[in-house]
Image (cartoon, rainbow, N blue to C red):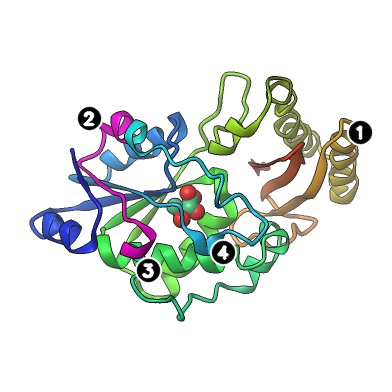
Amino acid sequence: MEIHHTVPALRQRLSWATRVVFVPTMGNLHEGHLDLVRLARKHGDCVVVSIFVNPLQFGPNEDYAQYPRTLDADCAKLEGLADVVFAPSVADLYPVEQTMFVEPPPLATELCGEFRPGHFRGVATVVLKLFNVVQPHAAVFGKKDYQQLAVIRALAEQFNLPIEIVAAETSRAPNHLALSSRNGYLSEAERGEAIRLFRNLATIREALQSGSRDYAALEQAARGDLESHGWRVDYLSLRNAATLAPAAPEERNLVVLGAAWLGKTRLIDNLEIALA
Ligand code: PAF
């Protein structure tokens, strides 16, 4: 496995690569990331993983400074799974001030976008830059970041990018907690409590599968359960799985998405729900 830090060095290495498949990450890798890389291997010959904590997608009061930077440990985990790691510095990827941005669709101002203004603009901009540098034929994104996946799909479609966007299922701990770098911020006690978000999403799924269609009541009950256990809920919302528009009464393909704070940690999760 080769590690490159600059755009020219990466381009030189990839100039003779065929069927490049790309996994963009912000590092601090866990099994969930490694599952994305394993899936990538099935979609190409040369697996490139980027490790870059993108300042553009963090708000002024968010955890950009604290976000764990663990490059050596990340590279050790990728050994044998990836062919190339691209780990640029901020100056390497943004050598001049970034004054042009990808303006994402209105969807990006809802759900996480409502609580993280500018987040998806930062994500879409860096992903377009990374796509231009790596020029993959396919790229893998996790469904854990469901809204991000929708924004990236729109980016590829609307800018005619010749890149297949591959969606990976969310990797979960044995207790179903979605794997996330931010789980590392949780205290021991919070780790036990963190599963409540998934449980509430699963309760909504069961209720829908049993015939309930009162979306507002289901969302409210889940919110109430979380709040009564000390969580601060950003949103809990049933949406159309393809468009992420608010779920219509007769929707068959839904996704329930949630984002909530447990102490100082913001957790997100979602569950797709296909109704017969
Ligand atoms: O999902 C992430 O880790 C980031 O948002 C991404 C796609 C690597 C862009 O910085």
Q: Can residue 105 be seen in this view?
A: yes
The residue that disc 4 covers is 120
Mark 4 or mark 2: name the one nearer the start of the chain: 2
Mark 4 or mark 1: name the one nearer the start of the chain: 4
Total residue callouts: 4
The residue that disc 2 covers is 80
Image position of 82 (left or right of 53): left
Decide whether residue 34 is among the magenta residues: no
Residue appearing at x 88%, y 38% in the figure: 227
The residues tagged by marks 4 and 3 sit, at their Cα atoms, a distance apart of 17 Å
Residue appearing at x 59%, y 62% in the figure: 119
Above or below, comparing residue 58 to residue 129 in the picture: above
Mark 1 or mark 2: name the one nearer the start of the chain: 2
Name the residue nearer the viewer: 267 or 269: 267
The residue that disc 1 covers is 228
Q: Which of marks 1 and 3 is in front?
A: 3
Q: Is residue 135 visible?
A: no
Q: Nearer the viewer, mark 4 or mark 3?
A: 3
Image position of 134 (left or right of 45): right
Q: Quadrant of the C terminus?
A: top right
| Residue 57 percent location from the top left of the image | 54, 61
Q: How crowded is mark 1: few (under 14 residues within 10 Å), some or many (20 or more)?
A: few
Image position of 97 (left or right of 209): left
- Mark 1: which amino acid? Ser
The residue that disc 3 covers is 94
Q: Magenta span covers which residues?
A: 75-92
| Residue 164 percent location from the top left of the image | 34, 58
Q: Which SS class for mark 1?
A: helix
Q: Which SS class for mark 3?
A: loop
- Mark 2: which amino acid? Gly
